Image (spheres, helix red, strand yellow):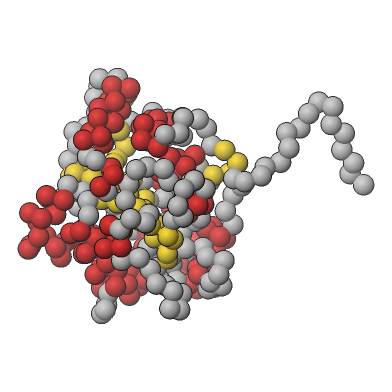
Amino acid sequence: MTSQEFNDRCIRQLRDARLEDRIAVIGSGPSSPYIAPIKTLQQQLCDRCGISTIPNEEFWALAERAHSNCPDEYFRVIRTTYGDTPHWQARTYDHIARLPVQGWVTFNYDDQLPTACFDVPGPPIDFSVYPAIGRQPYASPQEFLGSQKRLIALHGYCNDDNPAWEKQVILRTTDYNDHYIDNPAPLFIWWREMLLTAPCIFLGTSLKEPGLHRAIEHLMPEHRDRLEKMNHIHLINNQPDPKTQNYSTPGRSLFVINQIHYDPIDANFSGLIRILSEFSGLQFHRPIPRGTGPEPIRPTDTFSYS
């Protein structure tokens, strides 16, 4: 099977999955390469906080050690990484913002997805952030089933209106325990309701979020049948084996989330963008500048450096 045939099959499966009934849950994959990936953030935390990596250590555990060793540098790295967003925006988000879904949930801290959603013509999208600032409410799972499109940054957000936003993002083991495990565990309650309320499609995430894992683990004994009937989907990249050129067989993520595989084709995820373009109404092309960019340089230009 060629990559085109493989991705054509993915498109057919997504059409059958009825995106218009789903909530899109977005991870950090589409932000690459304009926002530092986890491996880069990990190295920055090690360098700035004076720690070393441990083989097979999960990122939230490394973040916990970095914060314990040097909290000021830890928060400085987080603010710099996600607050100083680039001029360029990943084109993937323009497609994601135009998918015919009920709404969007993002684990991301940068502003690329919100910016893309705000640029979509039509009625305004309700954007909320957890943890909430003061009395500002954040959207409940039930509200995503209403007529207004909603987007929520569920693990914090580089919010200009919140001068301490980097101290509220959910990254460390302690953060996950504070919001998912310790009473009243609002994010555990939020995900429990969402997973049993509306079918989700997880895109651009490995689903290694420990809080989400705990929520599903807790639901499994009594609600496994219900979770399976919701037909949650994990859209996951699948490159063919270089020796056999065969693709691996789709399975399940977190026990009950069905996988639909696609071939990314290249490091720019051209395969994914082509698939999304079938649903977004946008043509496939490369990333574009965000807002007004610099004028092109012409052969006739002269510059004054005084």
Could one spot residue 81 in this view of the protein? yes
Residue at 30% across / 58% down in the picture?
146
Up-down: is 246 above or below 202?
Answer: above
- Quarter the N terminus occupies: top left
**Which quadrant of the structure image shows residue 239?**
top left
* Relative to 249, 100 lies left or right: right
Q: Position of residue 124 (x, y in %)?
A: 46, 55
Which of the two residues, 69 or 157, is positioned nearer the viewer here?
Answer: 157
Q: Residue reaching furthest right? A: 306
**Residue at 30% across / 62% down in the picture?**
143
Q: In which quarter of the image is residue 271?
A: top left
Q: Position of residue 8 (x, y in %)?
A: 29, 25
Q: Which residue in the rendered view is the most extreme toward the top? A: 2
Q: Which residue is drawn at 20% across and 59% down?
A: 197
Describe residue 271's horizontal placement relative to residue 45 as left or right. left
Residue shown at the point (29%, 54%) measured from the top left: 208
Residue 64 shows in this picture: no
